[in-house]
Amino acid sequence: MKSYLATSAVTILAAVLGTTSAQAEEFVGPRVEATIGWNQLNYDLRDQQASESETNSELGWGFAAGYDVPLGTNLIAGIEAGISFADDKYSFVDGSSRRSYDGKRDISLMGRLGTRIGSNALGYLTAGYTNYRTDASVEIGDVLTSQTVNLDGLRLGGGLEVALTPSTYLKSEYRHSIYEDDISRNEILTGIGFRF
């Protein structure tokens, strides 16, 4: 993970220092992006007769589409819808039963507020709704029952977007999501996006 964070930081820094000056208008309008990075689910098992939390770290990836508008010379506000995936699988023993989760997807609807940093970067904060879909199963003896569960949640985050050209950008973003059933998620992502 440390090497991934270092690579992300170097990439963003090189983009900030190496690109030509961008105007505020380059951070507004419709956009699409793809992201990849570190994804960690945290299971708080204290309510499941266990003594501590467990974590599962995997590679995550996703896609998003958004629209940003100017609020002045340096401020922008926007909305974004996204979907992400990761190999989220975890199981634990709960008394005489074994419980398992097998994540399928995560969708979100976010708002964001940002401000220009220098000539070609945008720092921003995000907040909004997220929904995590997972297959949950319980095995007691030879009897296995399973169902698909949708867990609603709150997502908060922040990031840095760097304009490479008027229509392309790089980004690095941290996200923290809090779901139902004592499950939470941390993500550190790098992405590339395109504006229209």
Image: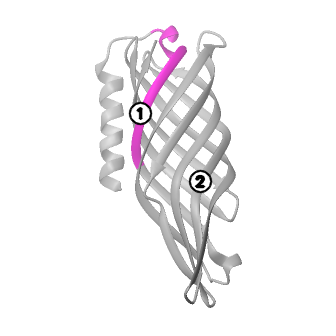
**Relative to residue 133, is residue 113 depicted above or below?**
above
**Is 175 or 21 nearer to us in this picture?**
175
Q: What amino acid is labelled 2 in the image? A: Arg
For residue 133, which numbered disc appears in the image?
2
**Is 116 or 150 nearer to us in this picture?**
150
Q: Residues within 10 Å of mark 2 (few under 14, many from 20)?
A: some
State which quarter of the image contains the N terminus.
bottom left
* Position in image of residue 179 (x %, y %): 67, 56
Name the residue: 63% across, 83% down. 50
Q: What element carries label 2?
A: strand
User: Which region is colored magenta?
Assistant: 23-37
**Is 45 or 10 nearer to us in this picture?**
45
Name the residue: 47% across, 48% down. 85
| First-in-chain label (1 vs 2) | 1
Where residue 18 sits, quadrant-wise, is top left
Name the residue: 32% across, 49% down. 4
| Left or right for 141, reference 23 | right
* Position in image of residue 31 (x %, y %): 49, 20
Residue on which the image places disc 1: 34
Q: Which colour scheme is used?
A: one colour
Residue 158 part of the magenta-drawn span: no
**Relative to residue 10, is residue 74 depicted above or below?**
above
**Relative to residue 196, is residue 11 depicted above or below?**
below
Q: Distance between the residues labelled 1 and 2?
A: 20 Å
| Left or right for 5, reference 181 | left
